[in-house]
Amino acid sequence: MNRSIRPLLTITVVLLMSVIPSTAQDSGRITLDATTLEKCVGILREGLHGDEFWPSMHAAEALTLAGYSQEVITFLDGKLDAEQDDQKKCGLARETARAGDRSTIRVMQAILAGDNPYGHVHAAESLFKVAEIGDGPAMRRGLSQNDNMKLKLMAAGALARRGDAAAMQTLRELLGTDDPADRSIAAWVLGQIGDSSDIPRLTQQMARCPDDATRASFEHALAIIGDESGLKALERNLSSEDSSIRTYAAAFASDAHAVSAAPRLKEMLQDPFADARIRAAQSLLVLAGPEIVPFSVETSAVLQELNPNSCWFHPRVAAIPGHGKDAGPAVVMTIQKHLGVSDHYSGLYTLRTDDLGQTWTGPMEIPELASQKTENNETIAVCDVTPGWLAHSGKLLAIGIRLRYSEQGKQLLDQPRSHECAYAVYDPKSDKWTPWKALAMPETDDRFFLVSPGCVQWLEQADGMLLVPMYFRGPDGSDYTTTVLHCSFDGQELKYRAHGDELTLKGGRGLYEPSLTRFQDRYFLTLRHDTAAYVTTSTDGLHFAPVRKWTFDDDQDLGSYNTQAHWLVHSNGLFLTYTRRGANNDHITRNRAPIFIAQVDPDKLQVLRRTEQILLPERGVMLGNFGAAAITPGESWVTDPEFLISSTSHPKGADGTTWLGRVQWSKPNQLIK
């Protein structure tokens, strides 16, 4: 192994980090006293401004993980343009992107795709570390060639992280390559994106390690994916006389969530080797934060259609346990057509897969859920639908907004209940849907003149009661108020029982399109506003704390506005899916592409920037209103269509695809049985 700690072996990955200091020792988080915290940050700032380039990049990475990304961006500003060395350009671009300015992704892409091979490995490695694959073809060329095994390994890792099963298999095969340095890299990458099934192959190949440094790479990889012997070896390596082994062990300690190593890491803040001090400070800050749940993403098309008059919109899915292939879940997607006029939608269609998205049937229009003409030439339809499985009744419930359209497709709002909560029930045993029904609400002439549970995530409680977030307003004004309805459901009829706090802001149409979830006995509500996205919490799902703007963990604004956001919940972590500014996407209306996913700090109510990944791509057009749902213990899905009403594709690639983004968890989601 290269003892000079070159960037190829700078081993920290965004998806395995956490940073916010905490006192929750019993939940696997260490406590940092003020003196130690100050010392850690001081070491990182000193390293950032130091004379050695790569330790400076390591310090930049660590400061981003510690919530100081704006400081990193300020320090790096201008350095990328001035740098001539492609390898160093990759380091600068990577750390700028990690800190939140993803405009530098294209620098790494260009180096990877360029003719000069000098920077290829560093570009592939850097793209891997920020969960990108570059332009796709360039990364695949790197994987397919055999002249440069380091490039092949990093390309395999980058593609595998994005869900490429063949690349993952190649990576596992390369673990047995003859060159010890290449085996070390393969072990490192596999430690970042592998799982417990890789423990036997790592253990077997470790016997071939010719020296302590190579062996340490395998030990650290084993520690990260949960092997107890690997964890013990990592803790021993923190005291190695070899500075490179000591440094790598410090870098990996947080990846392995080695809270028992904290005392030794604190001692390493005095290490004579600067990079060891930087990595020890980094891991201490990470171990003081919330547990991070590693995940990978894979994107595929459910359907693709170009039409000059309409496009598909509002695709949302729900799993029906035990009704799919081999006793797995069937998944039903509800979807409808956008008919060209703003917010003018068709009746409801459905698709279904019994093999977890390998094949689909549909879209099929459901007669009971189709739009209907009235005697005065108005059209009644239900839009913004979210389906969900109800364990207590064994039924699928779809909830949306029933609304009125003029002959020209304009929404009519002049009468009470022009927007109202509508629901329909699907019985998988009979394979039939009920017609739409309306939820009876009080005060429909005044407070609840318009009632809109549109594009919302709702919950079934343990006792079978439902919590349904919705937004409403009276006959006058333009600002919406959000509340959560407490409803009963007997398998056929949904009944209003009560509603919770009424949340609003003046201006910007108020607060609307709320989504609700539950994580570790608390309720979390994300809300749309025209100028920003907001969040709040509750202990009972009805009474909420004051709303606050969504921010990253460096206190910078999330940049999401005037569109919806949705939750994904894992038994070990809370996640937000969203769109935002600052992603080279100012050409997209309201910056509504790409769709991101990131883990949330549930205590600070902040998005953990270093966990952010692009889930669904931007290809020149905005993405429509989307859905997010758990499907199996291993996967959650996000679905969204490209908003393109045209007979031809967009020059940047959009072709009317309805996307399925799979979030593949590194450990089973115990909330899904």
Image: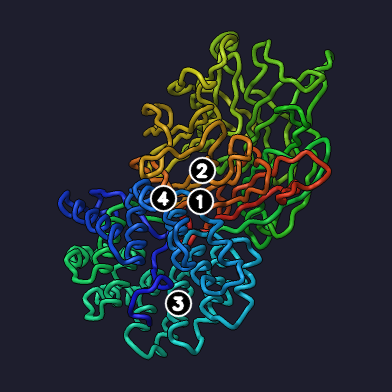
Residue 384's spot in the image, x, y percent?
Answer: 65, 32
Q: CA distance from mark 3 to mark 4?
A: 31 Å
On screen, residue 207 above or below 236: below
* Residue identified by numbered label 2: 582
Q: CA distance from mark 2 to mark 4?
A: 16 Å
Disc 4 residue type? Asp
Q: CA distance from mark 4 to mark 1?
A: 13 Å
Residue 29's spot in the image, x, y percent?
Answer: 27, 55
Q: Nearer the viewer, mark 3 or mark 4?
A: 4
First along the sequence among labels 3 and 1:
1
Disc 1 residue type? Arg
Crowding at dot 3, Cα within 10 Å, few <14 / some 14-19 / many 20+, comes out as: many
Is there a contact, CB below 8 Å, between mark 4 and mark 1?
A: no
Residue closer to the observer: 478 or 488? 478
Q: CA distance from mark 3 to mark 2?
A: 32 Å
First along the sequence among labels 3 and 2:
3
Disc 3 residue type? Ile
* Residue identified by numbered label 3: 185
Q: Secondary structure at mark 4?
A: loop
Residue 395's spot in the image, x, y percent?
Answer: 63, 41
Crowding at dot 4, Cα within 10 Å, few <14 / some 14-19 / many 20+, comes out as: few
First along the sequence among labels 4 and 1:
4
* Residue identified by numbered label 1: 102
Residue closer to the observer: 15 or 420? 15
Crowding at dot 2, Cα within 10 Å, few <14 / some 14-19 / many 20+, comes out as: some
